[in-house]
């Protein structure tokens, strides 16, 4: 019953994989998009539209530059065992993925669009990635704590019945602590889903904006 707590963390993949899959599809599309310099600028383009387009072209290059790191995130997720949540898997799936997301966010945050149309959506993406990375690290620590307490409980429960009674108080504390972890994991997963949806939504809005100017992100 208690060990089912360990599997709550699997839901995080729905968030990470959704974002990574989006990047994979845009990377594929960019191979056929051609260089931005080859695009034609409409003769009737206003000065403001020109600034927006320049913002978008610059943003597309920034996003494209992180394709390798986002591919690494995808590889980390696809190569991990979703049915196993030992210490090494937790470190790999939540620690390393979160670290890579934080690096992507840092690279993205160095770009400052001029126009609010691009800047606001770009900032949403950056903030969401930072929140995902932070929450992913917190989830990693929670799962590691669960692992440690489960291991201790298993060790105590393996003792002869004559000795087990001496550890009753500790077992009750572990039970209460695991119940607290249960609630914490659920809160963390809710945050991951919320920030993941915000990130994907902002990227989709950017894609709509860029498509209107004949530009591909990634």
Image (cartoon, grey):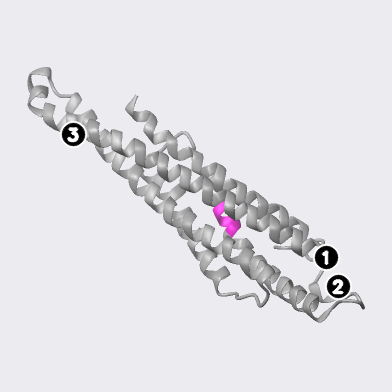
Please report the bounds of the magenta region as a residue range.
70-74
Q: Relative to 87, is 217 on the left or the right?
A: right
The disc placed on residue 39 is: 2
Q: Residue at x 53, y 48 (%)?
A: 194
| Residue 151 counted in the magenta span | no
From the viewer's side, name the closer residue of 87 and 216. Answer: 216
The image quarter containing residue 72 is bottom right
**Image quarter (top left, top right, bottom left or bottom right) of the C terminus:** bottom right
Provide the secondary structure element on which disc 3 rests: helix
Q: Residue at x 28, y 35 (%)?
A: 178
Q: Position of residue 204 (x, y in %)?
A: 69, 55
Provide the secondary structure element on which disc 1 rests: loop
Q: Position of residue 104 (x, y in %)?
A: 54, 64
Q: CB under 8 Å between callouts 1 and 2?
A: yes
Q: Position of residue 152 (x, y in %)?
A: 21, 34
- Is tag 2's residue or tag 3's residue first in the polypeptide sequence? 2
Residue furthest to the bottom: 47
Q: For the stretch drawn in magenta, what is the main secondary structure?
A: helix
Residue 76 visible here:
no
Circle 1 sits on which residue?
A: 214
């Amino acid at each position: 019953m208690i060990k089912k707590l360990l599997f709550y963390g699997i839901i995080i993949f729905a968030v990470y994989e959704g974002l990574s899959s989006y990047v994979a599809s845009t990377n594929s599309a960019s191979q056929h998009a051609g260089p931005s310099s080859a695009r034609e600028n409409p003769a009737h383009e206003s000065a403001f539209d020109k600034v927006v387009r320049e913002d978008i072209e610059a943003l597309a290059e920034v996003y494209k530059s992180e394709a390798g790191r986002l591919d690494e995130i995808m590889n980390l997720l696809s190569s991990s065992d979703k049915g196993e949540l030992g210490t090494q898997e937790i470190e790999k799936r939540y620690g390393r993925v979160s670290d890579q997301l934080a690096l992507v966010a840092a690279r993205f945050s160095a770009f400052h669009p001029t126009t609010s149309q691009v800047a606001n959506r770009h900032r949403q993406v950056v903030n969401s990635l930072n929140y995902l990375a932070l929450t992913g690290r917190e989830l990693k620590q929670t799962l590691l704590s669960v692992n440690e307490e489960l291991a201790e409980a298993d060790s105590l429960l393996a003792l002869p019945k004559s000795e087990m009674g001496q550890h009753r108080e500790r077992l009750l504390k572990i039970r209460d602590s695991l119940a607290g972890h249960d609630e914490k994991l659920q809160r963390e997963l809710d945050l991951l889903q919320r920030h993941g949806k915000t990130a994907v939504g902002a990227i989709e809005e950017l894609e709509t904006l860029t498509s209107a100017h004949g530009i591909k992100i990634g």
